[in-house]
Image (cartoon, rainbow, N blue to C red):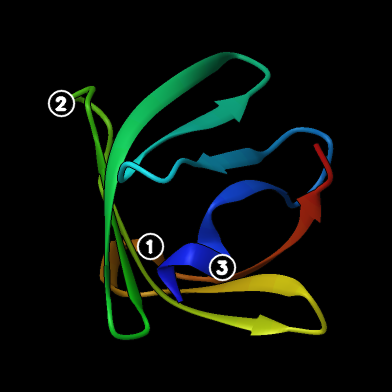
Amino acid sequence: LEKSLVGIWTADSYTIYEFNKNGKGILRIPSDDYAFTYIVHSNKLYIDFEDEDSIDLNFIFSFEDGDLVLQGIKESSGTYRFKRVEE
């Protein structure tokens, strides 16, 4: 599953997640970019932002019709659907 996660995903034109092969990534929103490291364990995705003021995120993730679906755990409530951005 981790290999399937690698790439660039967008929920809309404002929220973009970029997952790299090395367990690092960037959340891009219009106001700023937030670097993070991530771990995949089974169907769970753990995102640890480098900025200590940012709240780390935990999701259950799956793929539906080619989309990445993130379902929040604890502080990360909500369900989010992302489309892969072709590079």
Label annotation for residue 19? none
Left/right of residue 79 with respect to residue 14 in the rendered view:
left
Rendered position, 54 above or below 58: above
Q: Nearer the viewer, mark 3 or mark 1?
A: 3
Mark 3 or 1, nearer chain start? 3
Label annotation for residue 52? 2
Neighbours of disc 3 within 10 Å: few (<14), some (14-19), many (20+): few
Hey, which quadrant is residue 65 in on the image? Answer: bottom right
Q: Name which residue type carries label 2.
A: Glu
Label annotation for residue 4? 3
Q: Name which residue type carries label 1.
A: Ser
Q: Name which residue type carries label 3.
A: Ser
Residue at image position (76%, 55%) is 84
Mark 1 or 2, nearer chain start? 2
Residue at image position (21%, 25%) is 53
The kind of secondary structure element at disc 1 is: helix
Where is residue 30 drawn, in percent x and y? 68, 18
Neighbours of disc 1 within 10 Å: few (<14), some (14-19), many (20+): some
The kind of secondary structure element at disc 3 is: helix
